């Protein structure tokens, strides 16, 4: 079974600075998808960014980018120019490209933005 | 802007009562998921459907939980009888999977409290 580990329960960053959230995963599969979801206090789960394992190029979405290291099974999220609205829980998630299509989530990292 | 909708947003009930949660997936999406979020277990899959057919319900306590899709625009999750340990946030998510896209879009969740 796949597992996802987020080793940083909490992180904080000064507004306008850059922060990196860590995520590692364990799988024996070669094809899969990785996601970062954001959950603000409203509880809504919002997709931040996604990465297909077969793509070597790291995904980017505006101020959000990932560092995908397939051999190391690492998938970190970098947030540039942090804004107050970025404050939330961030969840890393794995989805197999075979069989069950459920998302397997990490335990989350709570990000605080310091004004 | 297409969204997954869930009703009710909040539900407080007493132990032993029946609870029904409803989800309207994004129009055209072929796959619907039910997830549960608790402090202890995090986010975990309860069940999911493709084209209204159940594919996996191994995450559900079968004796009290049931999930159905009466039609393509409605998914339901029922708990009967409810217990205090069922208190959690229940998310519905939908996606257009196995068609080259793979992203799951989440609804706002139903916060259930069983007294």
Image (tube, grey):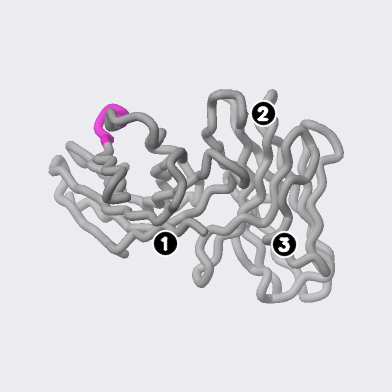
Label disc, if present, on residue A107 of the rendered structure: 1
Q: Do callouts 2 and 1 point to residues on the same chain?
A: no
Q: Is residue B71 above or below residue A95?
A: above
State which quadrant residue A70 falls in: top left
Of the pair A11 and A28, the residue shown nearer to us: A28
Can you give x and y, in whole percent of width and height, for residue B58 in the image?
A: 71, 59
Query: Subunit of mark 3?
Result: B
Q: Residues within 10 Å of mark 3 (few under 14, many from 20)?
A: some
Identify the disc placed on residue B29.
Answer: 2
Inspect this view and state whether residue A83 appears: no
Label 1: few (<14), some (14–19) or many (≥20) C-alpha neighbours in 10 Å:
many
Q: Element at badge 2?
A: loop
Q: Secondary structure at mark 3?
A: loop
Residue B78 makes an appearance in the image = yes
Separation of residues labelled 3 and 1 (CA atoms) = 20 Å
Rendering coords of residue B65 (x, y %): 79, 62
Instruction: Specify the subunit that label 2 lies on.
Output: B
**In the displayed image of the protein, which residue is found farthest to the right?**
B70
Chain on which label 1 sits: A
Same chain for mark 2 and mark 3? The answer is yes
| Boundaries of the magenta span | A59-65
Q: Quick check: A42 left or right of B46? A: left
Residue B87 point in image, percent of width and height:
64, 68
Residue at image mark 3: B60
Q: Quadrant of residue B111?
A: bottom right
Q: In terms of depth relative to the viewer, which is nearer, A100 or A35? A: A100
The residue under the point 33% across, 55% down is: A24
| For residue B9, above or below residue A50 | below
Verify CB contact (< 8 Å) between mark 3 and mark 1: no
């Amino acid at each position: 079974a796949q597992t996802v580990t987020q080793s940083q329960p909490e992180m904080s960053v000064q507004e306008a600075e850059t922060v990196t959230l860590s995520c590692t995963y364990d799988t024996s599969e070669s094809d899969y998808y990785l996601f970062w979801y954001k959950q603000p206090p409203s509880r809504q789960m919002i997709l931040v960014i996604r990465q297909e394992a077969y793509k070597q190029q790291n995904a980017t979405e505006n101020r959000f980018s990932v560092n995908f290291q397939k051999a190391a099974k690492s998938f970190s999220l970098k947030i540039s120019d942090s804004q107050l609205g970025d404050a939330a829980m961030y969840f890393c998630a794995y989805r197999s490209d075979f069989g069950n299509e459920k998302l397997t989530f990490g335990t989350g990292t709570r990000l605080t933005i310091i004004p | 802007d297409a969204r997954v909708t869930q009703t009710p947003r909040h539900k407080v009930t007493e132990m032993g009562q029946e609870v029904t949660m409803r989800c309207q997936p994004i129009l055209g999406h072929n796959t619907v998921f039910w997830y549960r979020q608790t402090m202890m277990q995090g986010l975990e899959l309860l069940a999911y459907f493709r084209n209204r057919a159940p594919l996996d319900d191994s995450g559900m306590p079968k004796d009290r939980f049931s999930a159905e899709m009466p039609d393509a625009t409605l998914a339901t999750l029922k708990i009967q009888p409810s217990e205090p340990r069922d208190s959690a946030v229940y998310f519905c998510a939908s996606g257009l999977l196995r068609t080259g896209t793979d992203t799951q879009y989440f609804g706002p969740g139903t916060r259930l409290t069983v007294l």
